[in-house]
Image (cartoon, rainbow, N blue to C red):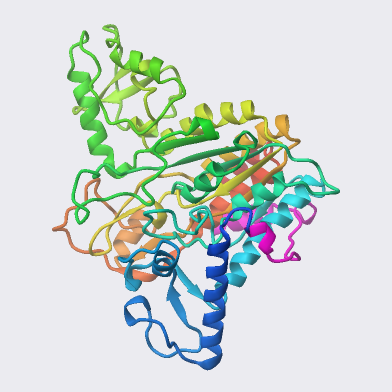
């Protein structure tokens, strides 16, 4: 908290303008991204809950679908099973007790308010009233598709309306008395794939006017197992690009798969130099598959250098060769063809920064947008529960380890392109970001700064970690402040960070 409060104290009143004076998102705005059936469903559900609130009862809600079946004046119901049953016509729906997305009498108002904030910010930036904007809104929206839940989806991911897609479509619409936005780019850096945004972008009648980029964790390696034993990191999408619709997906392997990745690289290092590289499951589609296929068949250079490294994931190596650890901790440098297949061969901050530097920035510059929207999730920060794999007993294994500085760095890089392409017009929209789990083990808290100390592969026989009822949101606020500083002055933010750390 000291770090974030220090950063906030360095912001002058003349540098930012805080606004809450805007209208809720209109039906016209929301109908640009969602079907009439879905909007009617959400509206009717809200009216029904308001009616129950006034009557002080919960009639009509099955106990199985209610998180709290007791009588209350403020009913809260599971949202996902309602969408599955009504919009998807599914006979088997998620149990209410397992639904992470809830809906109450205030949900529609809050969701419309969030969408209205993005519309207001887009207008202010396009007319030149503000250089950029940061929309601090909830609920998030990037998992909400045309019908709310995507076909076969298992969760709404806390989303009701897709705020960033609504903002993009509004920007591209013909509005009087403002700058004419011909092209809009959406950059999604939430730890989860923006599957709802991707679906909406795909249905855009003119895909040449939209670019969607998403860097996210991807783990769906248990596809072959039975449903009961399979695991996927939500939402389990974003595996490939869709070049025809200007969609770029960069999936990153979670840190809990480190052992599997190391084993794959060990196989490479043991291979004879005249043999082809081993076939690894590829989750990354490139623009030139022919070159990629030819490169994968090329032999490894005999003169590859061998160096020592203790943890290659902390390296910021971005040259034309990469490091590959073997089982003894040695790493072998392979030429670019051995590593260009996918970013799944590196993890953590290294893979994230490579994705931004090598995939986002060139694509963004080539697209040359008139406005850049950022789906901004802070759930990729180190220790955030949003990027963890959760085990029985409350134990967690981290998936990625971004620091607040990574968010200011990303913002600066995007702002540099925005200054070239669109006079710095950037609007960021809050998506995920929840906080760090606190445990009752005081020694463990002291040693790890409030996090449970975890092995790379949690053992089911270990003692359970008992969680308290709250999340520490210190790193969440630090990430937000770093992002805000970079928006205010991207070229001065790094200097301020260094002065604060000193």
Residues in magenta?
1-30
Please check the rendered image and state whether residue 9 is part of the magenta-colored stretch, yes or no. yes
Residue at 41% of width from left, 44% of height from top? 401
Residue at 73% of width from left, 57% of height from top? 120
Q: Is residue 147 above or below residue 501?
A: below
Give the quadrant of the N terminus: bottom right
Residue at 54% of width from left, 57% of height from top? 141
Instruction: Tell whether 9 sits left or right of 466.
Output: right
Task: Return the residue nearer the eye: 466 or 175.
Answer: 175
- Residue 113: x %, y % from top left: 65, 66
- Residue 246: x %, y % from top left: 55, 33
Instruction: Tell whether 357 sits left or right of 157.
Output: right
The residue most toward the right is: 177
The residue most toward the bottom is: 55
Note whether residue 25 is visible. no
Q: Quadrant of residue 446?
A: bottom left
Q: Is residue 434 above or below residue 195?
A: below
Please check the rendered image and state whether residue 301 is part of the magenta-colored stretch, yes or no. no
Instruction: Tell whether 260 sits left or right of 333.
Output: left
Q: Is residue 362 above or below residue 424?
A: above
Q: How many marks?
A: 0
- Residue 437: x %, y % from top left: 38, 62
Note whether residue 9 is visible. yes
Q: Quadrant of residue 443?
A: bottom left
Q: Is residue 231 above or below residue 360?
A: below
Give the quadrant of the C terminus: top right
Task: Return the residue nearer the eye: 408 or 390.
Answer: 390
Residue at 59% of width from left, 65% of height from top? 111
Q: Quadrant of residue 339?
A: top left
- Residue 426: x %, y % from top left: 68, 43
Instruction: Tell whether 197 sits left or right of 370.
Output: left
Task: Return the residue nearer the eye: 234 or 488.
Answer: 234
């Amino acid at each position: 908290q000291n770090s974030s409060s220090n950063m906030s104290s360095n912001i002058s009143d003349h540098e930012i303008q805080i606004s809450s004076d805007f209208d809720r998102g209109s039906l016209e705005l929301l109908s640009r991204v969602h079907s009439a059936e879905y909007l009617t469903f959400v509206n009717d559900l809200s009216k029904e809950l308001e009616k129950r609130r006034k009557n002080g009862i919960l009639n009509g809600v099955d106990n199985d679908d209610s998180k709290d079946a007791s009588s209350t004046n403020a009913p809260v119901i599971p949202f996902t099973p309602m969408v599955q049953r009504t919009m998807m016509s599914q006979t088997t729906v998620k149990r209410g007790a397992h639904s992470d997305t809830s809906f109450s009498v205030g949900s529609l108002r809050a969701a419309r308010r969030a969408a209205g904030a993005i519309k207001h910010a887009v207008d202010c930036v396009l007319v030149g009233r503000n250089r950029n904007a940061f929309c601090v809104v909830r609920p998030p929206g990037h998992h909400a598709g045309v019908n709310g839940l995507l076909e076969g989806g298992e969760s709404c991911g806390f989303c009701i309306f897709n705020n960033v897609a609504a903002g993009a479509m509004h920007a591209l619409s013909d509005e009087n008395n403002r700058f004419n936005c011909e092209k809009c780019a959406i950059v999604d850096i939430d730890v989860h794939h923006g599957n709802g945004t991707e679906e909406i972008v795909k249905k855009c009648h003119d895909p040449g006017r939209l670019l969607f980029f998403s860097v996210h964790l991807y783990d769906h390696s248990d596809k072959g197992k039975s449903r009961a034993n399979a695991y996927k990191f939500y939402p389990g999408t974003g595996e490939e690009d869709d070049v025809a619709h200007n969609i770029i997906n960069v999936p990153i392997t979670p840190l809990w798969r480190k052992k599997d990745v190391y084993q794959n690289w060990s196989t490479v290092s043991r291979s004879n130099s005249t043999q082809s590289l081993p076939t690894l499951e590829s989750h990354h589609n490139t623009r030139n598959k022919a070159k990629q296929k030819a490169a994968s068949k090329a032999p490894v250079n005999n003169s590859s250098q061998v160096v020592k490294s203790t943890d290659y994931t902390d390296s910021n190596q971005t040259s034309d060769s990469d490091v590959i650890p073997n089982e003894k901790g040695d790493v072998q440098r392979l030429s670019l063809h051995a590593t260009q297949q996918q970013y799944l061969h590196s993890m953590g901050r290294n893979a994230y920064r490579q994705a931004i530097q090598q995939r986002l920035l060139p694509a963004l510059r080539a697209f040359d947008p008139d406005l850049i929207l950022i789906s901004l999730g802070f759930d990729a920060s180190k220790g955030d529960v949003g990027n963890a794999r959760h085990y029985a007993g409350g134990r967690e294994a981290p998936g990625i380890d971004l620091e607040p500085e990574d968010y200011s760095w990303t913002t600066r890089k995007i702002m540099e392109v925005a200054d070239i392409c669109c006079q710095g017009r950037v609007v960021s929209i809050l998506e995920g970001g929840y906080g760090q789990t606190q445990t009752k083990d005081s020694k463990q808290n002291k040693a790890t700064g409030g996090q449970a100390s975890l092995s790379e592969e949690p053992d089911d026989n270990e003692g359970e970690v008992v969680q308290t009822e709250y999340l520490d949101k210190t790193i969440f606020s630090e990430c937000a402040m770093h992002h805000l500083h970079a928006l205010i002055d991207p070229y001065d933010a790094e200097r301020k960070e260094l002065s604060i750390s000193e």
